[in-house]
Amino acid sequence: MSFSRDVDLDLDLVKSKIKLLTDFLDIYIKIANVHTVDFYTKDIWNEFVAVSPETVISSLFSQQGGSTSEGKDGSIWDQSQRLHNVAAYRRITRDHSLSNLGVCTPLDDLRQELWGDKQKEMFLKTSTFMNTKKSHEVEVMSEIIACFAKYCNIKQVIDIGSGKGYLSSYLSMQYGLSVYGIDSSTTNTIGANERNRKLERYWKVYQRQTKPKTQDSKLEHPKQKHMNHTENFTKIKEPAGYIGEEEDTTELQPMHEQSIVQTPVSTTLADSEIYEKNVVETSAETAGSDEFYYSEHTFLGLLSTDVVELSPQVRQRKCLDEKEKERRKSASLEAKAKRVKQANLYSPVTLHVTSTTELHDITSDIKDSIVVGLHTCGDLASNTLRIFISKPELKAVCSVGCCYHLVSEEFEFSDRSQESCQGPWGFPMSQYLRSSAWHCGRNARMSACLPFERVTIGHGQLPLESLFYRAVLQVIIKEHFGNGKPPGAFQQTKDKHVGKMYFKSSSFVDYTRKATEKLGMDSSKMSDSLIQGYYDRFIPRIKELEAFNLLKVALAPCIEGLILLDRLCYLKEQENVAWSSLVQLFDPVKSPRCYAVIGVKKQYHSKI
């Protein structure tokens, strides 16, 4: 089966949307390219805006935007090219945001194409070991990855920029996929290994598995009568082997609240026979302890039957003939090998990934795979797509990028001597956009990271006070350390990073002392009262800073949209890609970087 028109776009349509965005941003991107550091030193508010901060704030949060005609006739700007119609500005930026351009495949439509009307239920709850944001991201993205892996007949996943391994470990345990988690940080890899070890321990020790429901096996577990009267049972679904197969309903009783991890196990008739003949009856007094019944589905079940000390009840059973004993022993060993293999489906690897990285640097056992990345920073998202295109073993890609300010731009500098990127550029990727030598600028790319929905819908707050501290600090630097220095010295100072000094400071005076010391400046001749005077001087104008940053927030989805459409266009330009799309995977209030670039190569397209 192939995707319907509702979940597919042609290259010409993507190009037309890119042209629409670039024409729009040619006019408006100047707002996004303003750096907060310069806000007071260059009097940005009076240079760009002709109305009061209160007018901007109220208009941007108003439920009524300006009319379309107001956004097209140039009335947004006054004669001096300062913004004066904020309602129209809000409307036109909204119309040019990625969510309103009509280029994204709805997640529900994609699910319908992949799953049909089948209901999906999770047996492994991410909320037990992840925060709300990460849990939301991992559950949704892993479902889509597993769907594509299933329909492309792929069992191996390469997770680039895997970090702490949240997505990788979940894919391996929930869906039984073999996952290689690649991260450049040794610390992350070590942490992922340790975290995975703990998850495997929960997986093995706390697992509960009821009987397989077959016509030939209708065994009731010896503890079932006791368990049926125990409160706080959790209803779960456990997949039989791999996604898409028939599932059995299982009941389990938590030992410690929300500390249980279930494992995907295959339940067959042979398994049920092993289960029936290896069950150990346990008294009600041991229920809730760590003494679990023995079956091939538990931790002790990983041991062969001849090394497990059986209970008196089991020893009283009739002696078995040698042939039956050997059959059971072989079956137990097979179950052990299977469980050990499943327990090691996720392998963290430390490796710095570039567009030229060879897959055999990751593993010699490379098979047909899907390459994925959840919030891969900067150029890593672009390189993930390039690796997908260049490696024949990679059959599908699902990439969610972030940190656009770290993306390298080919045409950012008119002076080519300032180029810092030695490899392929992160933006633009498509030949279409490269042909126009279009660029955003670092400040605009940083603005693209602003959480529009979280601020406007979720009522989130920008780090206003820390931004204010930095802008006022720049006034102090200019007035006290900018005179008498060689040309360009002030610019170099401005480009230095103060970092997260705000969170380490008790007041603005303390912040100024620590920041100037970090920048290599001596502030000892400045009294505390002098420094505090700068704070008192600009605090009445903090609303200007807040309002201007909201103007940048409104523009953020448009800039992000251009970056993502460029990546989509790159995939659609490739001859070996049959289908590609942008999909909003996450709730943008919970996870602002919510769009995935997804692609499938031609040889697998007919299966999807």
Image: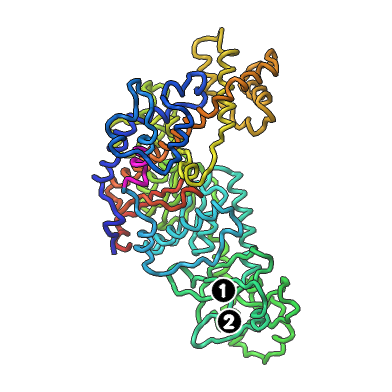
Q: Are marks 1 and 2 in contact (CB under 8 Å)?
A: yes
Of the pair 279 and 90, the residue shown nearer to us: 90
Magenta stretch? 91-101
Q: Residues within 10 Å of mark 1 (few under 14, many from 20)?
A: many
Residue 100 placed where, x, y %?
Answer: 34, 46
Q: Amino acid at mark 2?
A: Ile
Q: Amino acid at mark 1?
A: Ala
Asked whether residue 92 is drawn in magenta, I would say: yes
Residue 486 drawn above or below residue 116: above
Residue 574 placed where, x, y %?
Answer: 29, 46
Residue 299 placed where, x, y %?
Answer: 64, 70
Asked whether residue 52 is drawn in magenta, I would say: no
Quadrant position of residue 33: top left
The reply to whether residue 470 is visible in this rendering is yes
The circle drawn on residue 335 is 1
Q: Residues within 10 Å of mark 2 (few under 14, many from 20)?
A: many
The number of numbered discs placed on residues in the rendered structure image is 2
Q: Which residue is at a point 67% across and 22% down the rendered structure image?
A: 513
Label 2, on which residue?
274
